[in-house]
Image (tube, rainbow, N blue to C red):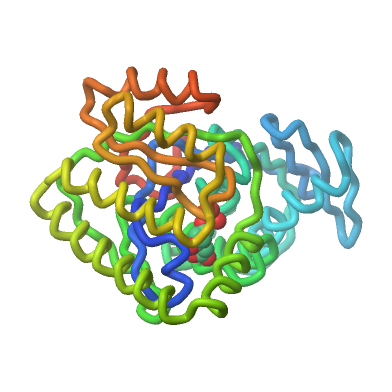
Amino acid sequence: MEVIASAPAKVILFGEHFVVYGEPAMVIAIDKRAYAKAQNRSDKRIYIRSSNLNLAAYFENSNFKVEKGDPKEAKLKFEPVRLAVEKVLEKHGETAGLNIEINSTVPVAAGLGSSAAVVAAVTTAVSTLLNVNISREEVFRITYEAEKIMHGTPSGIDPAIATFGGALLFQMDTGFKPLEVKMDIPLVIGDTGIERSTRVQVDKVRELRERYPQIMESLTWAARQIVMRALEALKDKDLETLGELMNINHALLYGIGVSDESLEWLINAARKAGALGAKLTGAGGGGCMIALARNEKLEEISEAIRRAGGTTFIARKTDEGARIERA
Ligand code: PMV
């Protein structure tokens, strides 16, 4: 028997970085998914294979053995998967050998939440295979626990959106709140191809905040106003205002030093080609940018971003969080 499950990637539309200081951030799940196939094994190994990363390894008792790829990378990438599998096995009440095959279409280390999507898909596939009844809240919690190994103190945005899908408003003290979005949000995602560390970017902003507390306070206040205004624009299905707000939000992110030349090239190219707005998404310093556009402009903007050196794909909001594809 085998089960295939999937979970979506995400983009932050508004509020990254300022969210660390208690402001709201708006995030949506996009129609780019990570897939996980789970199968029973006759032995007790947890065998994990990722075709995109070209890695294969297994955990057995306390041993970890790499069969394909760089051992350090395999350990780093597979440890959260193992933890999620173990949490499901705990609920199952007995050990079991499993084959886990990961197939993700989500770019890695680009701020699109690829690791959370993989873990949410694995958790869903394994629990279905073993007939372990788990709620969505539990999928979220397990994914969040697994993410902590990767990121230390993640905000929880990625596991939440990978599990529940749709659109969320996230705030540190109140957690996440589902947003009802009745409009299409056509986006071009441009990947600079430059991997970056969220932690380094967050530290950079913290230092700036220590040096210029009053200025940063004003910018943080402005970031909150942008999110509030964006909520209204979503209600009004006002794509143009959303685009303008993205431009203003990007100006703030540029101001706090988290953009870089590679992102600026792609953002400028997108705007010149007719985007309603464009900004970096996630931690910045490389990674991805997003451009909001009318449907008929998407291809042209994609092309412009590619000419400026990025790789692109067109994305739309998806309401579907972690789900079973085949059981
Ligand atoms: O690039 P990502 O998805 O890791 O985004 C990080 C978002 C930040 O606001 C910069 C950090 C955070 O923990 O929310």
Where residue 13 sits in the image (x, y, percent)? Answer: 35, 51
Residue 272 in the figure: left or right of residue 326: left
Where residue 181 sits in the image (x, y, percent)? Answer: 19, 51
Seen at 39% across and 36% down, the residue is: 31
Residue 240 in the figure: left or right of residue 145: left
Give 82 or 179, whichever is nearer the viewer. Answer: 179
Figure quadrant of residue 151? bottom right
Give 67 or 179, whichever is nearer the viewer. Answer: 179
Task: Say above or below: 83 vs 110.
Answer: below
Task: Say above or below: 134 vs 307.
Answer: below
Figure quadrant of residue 268? top left
Give 42 or 207, whichever is nearer the viewer. Answer: 207
- Total marks drawn? 0
Task: Say above or below: 84 vs 313.
Answer: below
Task: Say above or below: 131 vs 280.
Answer: below
Seen at 15% across and 53% down, the residue is: 233
Where residue 238 sits in the image (x, y, percent)? Answer: 12, 45
Q: Is residue 63 visible?
A: yes
Give 112 or 164, whichever is nearer the viewer. Answer: 112
Seen at 64% across and 65% down, the residue is: 87
Q: Is residue 128 visible?
A: no
Seen at 57% across and 37% down, the residue is: 107
Q: Quadrant of the N terminus?
A: top right
Where residue 97 sits in the image (x, y, percent)? Answer: 75, 49
